[in-house]
Amino acid sequence: MSTAHHGNQQRGVALIMAILIVALATILAVSIATESYMDQRRTMTVLVLDQAYDLGLGAEALAADALIEDSKGSTIDTNKENWATPIILPVDDGIGDIKGNLEDLQGRFNLNNLLNIDGTKNETTVKQFERLLEIVGLDRRWANIMVDWLDANNDTQSPDGAEDSVYAGQSPPYLTANMAITRTSEILALVGMTKVMYDKLEPFVSALPPGTGLNVCTAPHEVLDSLATTRSQFGNNTNTFASNRANGCFPRLTEIKNDFRGDPDFDKLITAHPDYLVEASNYFRANILVTIGTTELAMYSVLNRFGNSTNAKIRVIERNFGTPN
Ligand SMILES: [Ca+2]
Ligand SMILES: [Ca+2]
């Protein structure tokens, strides 16, 4: 009996071993299958992203081409020209598409214009920026804080500036840039600047080379209205503004100069910087979204158009992925 019992025990152990082995084998098989599936997915994503990147570069080249074409026939730049028309191109019979549009960055307030070319504070554009801040619902004190962020010195603007001592007291501590910015998102480094505040301002500002002009044909009414305080504001009737814009450049340079003349701040700005307001642009951003299956690639390329109308050229001065700046 005891032998038979012993034999049963052995069979029992063998059965458990067999079940365990099968279970382990199953786990292993599932794990191998999952891993190889994940490997396939990863490889596919890498390949598709590569493809999306190449397609993005293609869309960027198309954008550059549109800007070169434009320079041949026109001396002004408006949102009614061909380059400003958004494009959608299908990829391989509908497995994806490329969406793209070009935006004139010179319609925005250039933060680097808060300083004169010689690096000193530009009193006239700082006044304009203070008004722009108010128009978008932010405190005007950000203007002087931005001046301190940009200017090379460590002397704090009165009363609202912030230099190294303020930033060194943060956790983690850091220092002011004390130079021109290349991305508007640097604003987020200012002490107290929140994402919500930044999002209010972002559509109206750029980070272009110092001295770059403001295109009145493409500037939103918020930016135009920041040029003067005592004149009728375009933002007071946005429908009229939009319908005037539907015909091309509005307001024309001569119109806005006539309309705003007599406003003390506007007169000072135009006297100090006669070339500040323009009707043509050299800096654009191509916003490109490539979708292939479930993979998306967002690409933002800043394009600089230079040379004359018979021989215009484009250089890409910045490429961002995922976010515009
Ligand atoms: Ca044009
Ligand atoms: Ca400074």
Image (tube, rainbow, N blue to C red):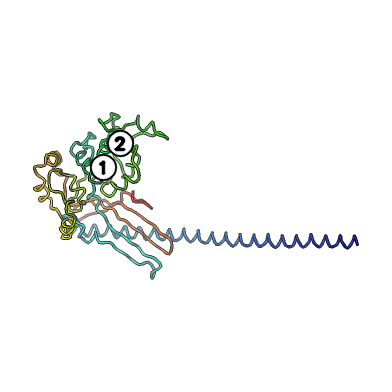
Q: Earlier in the sequence, mark 1 or mark 2?
A: 1
Neighbourhood count class around disc 1 (C-alpha, 10 Å): few under 14, some 14–19, many 20 upward:
many
- On the image, the x and y values in percent for residue 299 come to 35, 55
Left or right: where 224 falls relative to 53: left
Indicate the amino acid at tag 2.
Trp
Residue hosting label 1: 111
In front of the other: 249 or 230: 230
* Residue 268 in the image: above or below residue 277: above
Residue hosting label 2: 149
* Residue 285 in the image: above or below residue 146: below
Query: Quadrant of residue 174 in the image?
Result: top left
Which residue is painted at 90% across and 61% down in the image?
3
Mark 2 secondary-structure assignment: helix
Assess whether mark 2 and mark 1 are in contact (beta carbons under 8 angstroms).
no
In front of the other: 45 or 185: 185
Which residue is painted at 34% across and 60% down in the image?
58
Left or right: where 41 falls relative to 190: right
- On the image, the x and y values in percent for residue 186 come to 33, 42
- On the image, the x and y values in percent for residue 202 come to 29, 47
Indicate the amino acid at tag 1.
Leu
Mark 1 secondary-structure assignment: helix
Left or right: where 170 falls relative to 36: left
In front of the other: 287 or 60: 287
Disc 2 under 8 Å from ligand 2? The reply is yes
- On the image, the x and y values in percent for residue 1 come to 91, 62
Figure label count: 2
Residue 269 visible in rendering? yes
Neighbourhood count class around disc 2 (C-alpha, 10 Å): few under 14, some 14–19, many 20 upward:
many
Mark sitting on residue 280:
none
* Residue 148 in the image: above or below residue 261: above
